[in-house]
Amino acid sequence: MKKIQSKKLLMGRLGYGKDLLQEITDICLAENIGLGRVEAIGAVQKACIGFYDQKARDYQFRKIEQALEIVNLTGNVSMKEGHPFVHAHISLADHKGNVYGGHLAPGTTIFACELIVEVFEGAILERTLDEETGLPLW
Ligand code: ZN
């Protein structure tokens, strides 16, 4: 475990119709955030979420083509191949309250989203390929 400190918080609204993962990533790139955590609530027009198949060592992606509430989005920011990289998981509820969840993937379109980013300092966490899992881990 690395010792880190909270440096600052950013809070704001993300753009209608934009890709959720890309918007968060763009903020981290623009603000030069290489270490931190993210959380958000809101709603999406459609979603794409991943499930990591541990045997196949590959993501299976599920597209959900309907309006959904973001019950929770939580994730972290670290470095991968020299650039800030956002890893986020999301829980989404449909109009009946059924919840879908998984690894946030490109293809999730924002309806409305309120984001908080906490910026950390004190360490660098770099993702590299982990042979045991096949995942890019710290
Ligand atoms: Zn994940």
Image (cartoon, rainbow, N blue to C red):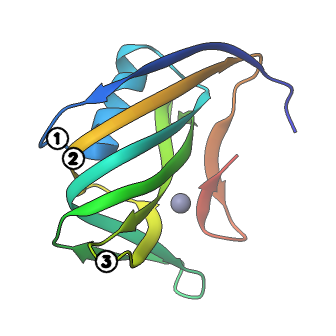
Report the mark closest to the observer, 2 or 3: 2
Residue 113 image position (x, y, % from top left): 30, 39
Q: Tag 3, which secondary structure? A: strand
Could you tell me if the residues under marks 1 and 2 are in contact, i.e. CB atoms within 8 Å?
yes
Label located before the other in sequence (1 or 3): 1
The three-letter code of the residue at mark 1 reads Lys
Which labelled disc corresponds to residue 60? none
State which tag comes first along the sequence, 1 or 2. Answer: 1
Which of the two labelled residues, at mark 2 and mark 3, occupies the earlier sequence position?
3
Question: Dot 1: within a 10 Å radius of its alpha carbon, few (fewer than 14), some, or many (20 or more) residues?
Answer: some
Camera-side residue of 107 and 90 = 90
Residue 57 shown left or right of residue 93 in the figure: right
Mark seen at residue 18: 1
Q: Which residue is mark 3?
A: 62
Residue furthest front as drawn:
96
From the viewer's perspective, tell me whether residue 127 is left or right of residue 41. right
Task: Give the quadrant of residue 14.
Answer: top left
x then y, percent, for residue 7: 67, 11
Judged by depth in the image, the label closer to the viewer, 1 or 2, is: 2
Where is residue 123 shown, x and y percent of the image? 75, 22
Mark 2, residue position? 110
Q: Is residue 65 above or below residue 68?
A: below
Query: Ligand 1 near label 2 (Cβ, under 8 Å)?
Result: no
Q: Residue at x 41, y 45 (%)?
A: 41
Question: Identity of the amino acid at label 3?
Answer: Arg
- Relative to 109, 10 lies left or right: right
User: In whole angstroms, how far apart are the C-alphas of marks 1 and 3?
Assistant: 19 Å
